[in-house]
Image (cartoon, grey):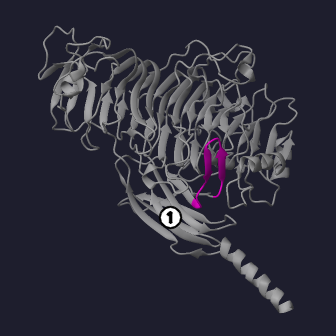
Amino acid sequence: MKRSISALLCLAAFKLAAADKVTSKDFYVEPPTLISLGFEWQIDGDDNRNASVAVSWRKKGDQAWHEGLPLLRIGNERLNENAIQYVTPNMLAGSIFDLEPGTEYECRFVLSDPDGVVGKSENLVTVRTRFEPKPAEGGKIYHVYPADYKGEKQQPAFTGLMAAYNTGSTHSDNFNTYPPRAQPGDIILVHAGLYQDDHMKYGGPGGTGPSDGTYYMTHGGTAEKPLVIKAAGDGEAIFDGDGNFNLFNVMAGSYIYFEGLTIRNTDLAFLAGLKNIAGASGITIKKCHIENVGRAFYSDWSGSKDFYITDNVISGRFPADHLMGFTGRTWQKYGPSPKLVSEYAIKVYGSGHAVAYNHVANFHDGIDVATYGDPDGSPNPIRDRLPVSIDFYNNDITNMEDNCIESDGGAYNIRVMRNRCFNHGHRALSVQPLFGGPVYFIRNIVYHAPEGGAVKLTATSSGIVLYHNTLIAPVKPMLGAISNVHFRNNLILGKSETPETFAVETYTNYSSSDYNGFRPNEGAEFSFEWMSPPFGTLSLYAAKSPLSPQERIKAEAGSKEDRRFKTLKEFSEATGQDRHSVVVDYDVFQKVTPPDPNDPRILYKAEDFDFRLRPGSAAVDAGVPLPNVNDGFTGKAPDLGAYEVGQPLPHYGPRE
C-alpha cells in the first residue's frame, strides 16, 4: 500500500510539473502600423504562469540589437458581461514601439520557463512597418469647382465632386447609373468654395443623390495608389451636409485619401463600416477640419484594416464654454443629462489603424475602439477579423462628456501613447471590455476628470499596462474587478472630493504595481486599496468553464479580500505592491495646480499648465528602466510621469 501511495504521489507531482512546463504553439505577426509592431505567441501549459518571452529588435542591416518590453503573459481570464462570454487564449503578446515608417525590422523572441520548454523556443521574423499614405505619381488629375464658380477653370474641370469621381452626376433616380471615372492613383483637386447640395431637390445636375445628400464612394484605390480627394490649395473647400445623416459613405471604397477639406453640418461625416454588413480598409483622413458633426468617423466592421486619421481638427456640438457629464453624483445637482448631440469623434474596429495628432473637442467620447462584443468566430476567433494592432497617439482631446479615449472592444496590442486628455466628465481612459490585452497606456496626461477618476477599468477587462502616465485624478475601481493589470512609473495625484488616491480591485494576484508617485488626500479615511484573491491564490479563474453571472457575483462578494490603508508605507508592507513608490505633491511640477473641487464645469486650458518636472523633485530618478519605453533617460533612473527631465516634450494635436 505504501508503494502504491508513493507511486500516486509521484504521478501527481509529475502531472503538476508537466502542467507547469510551457509548450510552444503558433506565433503570429499582427498587421503593422506606421510606428508599431504587434506579436502573439500561443502556448499550452504554464499553469504557474512563470513563462516569459524576451524581445529584441533591430533595423534590418544593423548589427546591434535593441531590447524590447517582454511579451505580456495573458490567458484564461474570464470576461462576462451582458452578451460577452469570453475566455482569453493561453498566450503571450506584446508590441515594439516608436519605429520608423516603411522600414524593415528583424524581431527576435525567446521563450523560457524555469519548468522547461516543449517545442520551439525562439522565433525570428522580419517585418516592415507601414508607410505613410500619400498621393501616387503619374495618375490623372481632375479639377472640381462649386456650382457658383465664375472664374477660369483648370482642365479637365467638373462641377461637383461626383461629376469627377464618376462619369456624371444627377439629382434623380439615375444618380447611381454613372460608371467610375477616377481610378487608383488619380487625384481629384477640390477648389475653394461651398459644396452644399439641396438634397431635397429632385432633378438637374448635382453632387449627391437625391433625398439623403450622401456622397457614396463605391470604388477606391490601392495601398500604393490611393484614390485622392484633396483641397486644391486656393482657399477653403467646404463640404456642408445641410443637416443630413451621413455625408461621405466609404464602406465600399477602400484606399480613398482625403486631405485638407472642411466638412461640416452632418450627423456622421465618414461612414466606413457596419458590423456584419460591409466595410472599407485603407481610408486616410488628413489635415481636415470636421466641425458641427454628431460623429466624425465610424467603422465597426471587423475586416477593416489600415485606417490613417491624422492632423485633423474635429469639433462636436456640445457647448464649448463648460464641461458637463452624463452620469454620476458629481453631475446630479446640475440637472438631467444633456442630449447626445455629438456621440464621439472617431470610432474604429479591425486592425492596423493609426489615429494620431488630432485635436478633438466637444463630444461625448473622443477616440474609441468600437465596443463590438466577442471577436468574430469566438471561442475560436477568425484570425483576420481580430481587433488588434491599433495606435492612438499624440492626440489633444478636451471637453468630453464621458471619456477621452476608449480601448473598449480591443483584443491584443492596443497602443494609447502620448495623448493629452483635459476636461472629461467621466473617466478619461477606458477599458471596457478588453479581450486579453495588452492595451498599453504610455505617457498620457489626464487633467480634470471629476466623476470617477482617471481610468475606467471594469470586470470585462484584462491585460492592462499603464506606464509613465501623469494622472491628475484618482485611480479607483468601477463595475467589478479587473484582471492582469500593471502600473509602473506613473504619477497619480489625488483629489480632495474622493477618499482614495489609488484603489485596485482585481481577480488576479499576478496584477502588479510599483515605482509610482502618489499624492494621498489630506485627512482621507484611506488612500490606498488593494482588493484581490487571498494571497497565495493565483486567480479566481481555476474553473475550466466561464463563470456564470451568479458565480461571478458570488466571487465578487466573497472571494476577494479588501485591504485599505492610510499610508503608502502601510500599503506596500501589507500587499508587497509599490515597494519602490514615493509620495509626491504638486510641487514636483513646474506649474500644475489641482482642479477646483467646487465647480466641475470649468474647462481648463492645457497651455496654462506646465507638467515638466522640477529638477531634484521626488519624481525625478524615481522610476524603473522599461526597455523601448524610457530608453535614453537622463539621470540615474527614469523619471516618473509623462515627461523626462531634459527630453523634448511631445507634440499634441495637428502638426504644421
Say which quarter of the image contains residue 249. top left
Q: Position of residue 27 (x, y in %)?
A: 48, 63
Place of residue 552 in the rendered image (x, y in percent of width and height, measured from the top left): 74, 48
Considering depth in this image, is 100 or 211 the residue closer to the camera?
A: 211
Check disc 1 and give the amino acid type: Phe
Q: Which residues are magenta?
A: 76-91
Tell whether 155 sits left or right of 200.
left
Relative to 116, 131 lies left or right: left
Q: Is residue 88 magenta?
A: yes
Residue 73 higher or lower than 360, as above or below? below
Q: Position of residue 103 (x, y in %)?
A: 35, 51
Residue 582 visible? The answer is yes
Could you say which is closer to the camera, residue 394 or residue 84? 84
Residue 614 in sight here: no
Secondary structure under the numbered disc 1 in the rendered image: strand
- Residue at 30% x, 33% y is 257
Query: Neighbour class for label 1 at 10 Å: few (<14), some, many (≥20)?
Result: many
Name the residue located 56 percent from the left edge and 21 percent from the top edge: 607
Q: How many marks?
A: 1
